[in-house]
Structure formats: structure tokens, C-alpha cells
Image (tube, grey):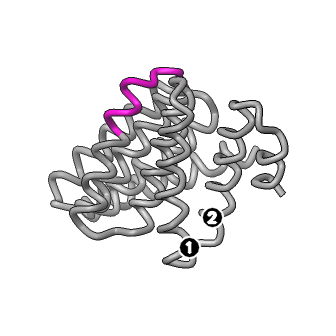
Amino acid sequence: GGLQTSIRFLNEGLEKTQETQNKRGESYVHGNLGEVHNILGQYPQSLEFHDQHLALAKQTQDKHGEGQALGNKGEVLYNQGKYSEALLFHQQHLEITREIKDKLGESQALMHLGRVYLATGEPDRALATHQQSLDIAIAIKDRLGEGQILSYMGDVHDFRGETGIALEHYG
């Protein structure tokens, strides 16, 4: 299907970036391959690609790429239910986004941290973190992010048994 086609094209892209010694491009292709393998539930392969993305991002002094790789690793660990590890990677991602003043990345890192807080039974902390994320998303006019965050805020209210409030966030 579509994801297998994506993997084929990404592997071709990986070969090209390696042939031309485009380390930054290679870094991002590794990250994209990691994302596809995460979607497929192939977590060990996903983590390997994200590790390669992270190493190349550090080598090329690409702080944005480094942050993305850390956040992506956090998502793979979250999907595996390894919440304490996921938390560490998302916190590192958040630190980098703030360091480089990447507001979109900061909003995304906060959103993912909120999901981890809910998964670990901290709904108040999850809601506060999602609110910070939402405030940034609104400020930078990230409409897609706003929708995602509102949905996750609905999950928090649902977790608390606040069905009416949850439905408002989902609507």
C-alpha cells in the first residue's frame, strides 16, 4: 500500500542524500522513515531511524532537527506505553524549541507532554500543559494544531468524567 510506497521512495531519497553527502537531507529522510515505521507499529526500526536522525542533526548542528528527532522518539516510546522515557524525550524537545524560539515546535512539544501527563494519571497537569500549547497555537495561527489540542483537552475532560465539557472540545 501507500506506506510501503513511501518507504521505497524514502529509501531512494536516502541513497541520493548519501551519494551527494547531504547530511542534513539524510537526517530528515531518516526522521521520515522513522515516522512511517512508527505508523506501521514497527517500533524498533522507528527508534533506529530516529536515533540516526538525531545523530546526524547533532553532527550538522541542526537544532531544529535535533528537537524533532527527540520529539519523534518520545512519540514512539509513548505508543509503546513507555511513558517515563517518552516524558524525558518530550521535555528535551521542549527545551530545544524554546532555545531556538520555535513556537510551532514548542506548541507540539507541550501537546505531546500533555498526552503523557494524562497517560500517567495527571489530568490537571495535562490540561494546564495543553492550555499552554493551545495558547501558542492560537497566537501563531496554527489551526491544525488548535484542533488536535482541543481534541486532547477533550480526552482529559472525558478522563475526569466531564462528558459535556469533553464534547464541547470535540465539537
Residue displayed at 70% across by 40% down: 157
Crowd rating for badge 1 (residues with CA inside 10 Å; few <14, some 14–19, many 20+): few
Name the secondary structure under disc 1.
helix
Crowd rating for badge 2 (residues with CA inside 10 Å; few <14, some 14–19, many 20+): many
Work out whether residue 31 or residue 156 is closer to the camera in this orientation and state it. Answer: 156
Whether residue 70 appears in magenta in the rendering, the answer is no
- The amino acid type of the residue labelled 2 equals Glu
Q: Are marks 1 and 2 in contact (CB under 8 Å)?
A: yes
52 above or below 23?
above
- Residue 125, percent across and down? 47, 39
Q: Is residue 15 left or right of residue 162?
A: left
Quadrant of the snapshot with the N terminus: top right
Residue displayed at 77% across by 38% down: 162
Residue numbers of the magenta segment? 80-89
111 above or below 161?
below
Work out whether residue 47 or residue 129 is closer to the camera in this orientation and state it. Answer: 129
Work out whether residue 105 or residue 10 is closer to the camera in this orientation and state it. Answer: 105
- Residue 152, percent across and down? 65, 46
Whether residue 86 appears in magenta in the rendering, the answer is yes
- The amino acid type of the residue labelled 1 equals Ile
Residue displayed at 28% across by 70% down: 101
Quadrant of the snapshot with the C terminus: bottom right
Name the secondary structure under disc 2.
helix
- Residue 99, percent across and down? 21, 62
Q: Earlier in the sequence, mark 1 or mark 2?
A: 1
Q: Using the image, tell me which numbered label, if any, was put on residue 37.
A: none
Residue picked out by circle 2: 146
Residue picked out by circle 1: 138
- Residue 15, percent across and down? 39, 53
Q: Is residue 41 left or right of residue 85?
A: right
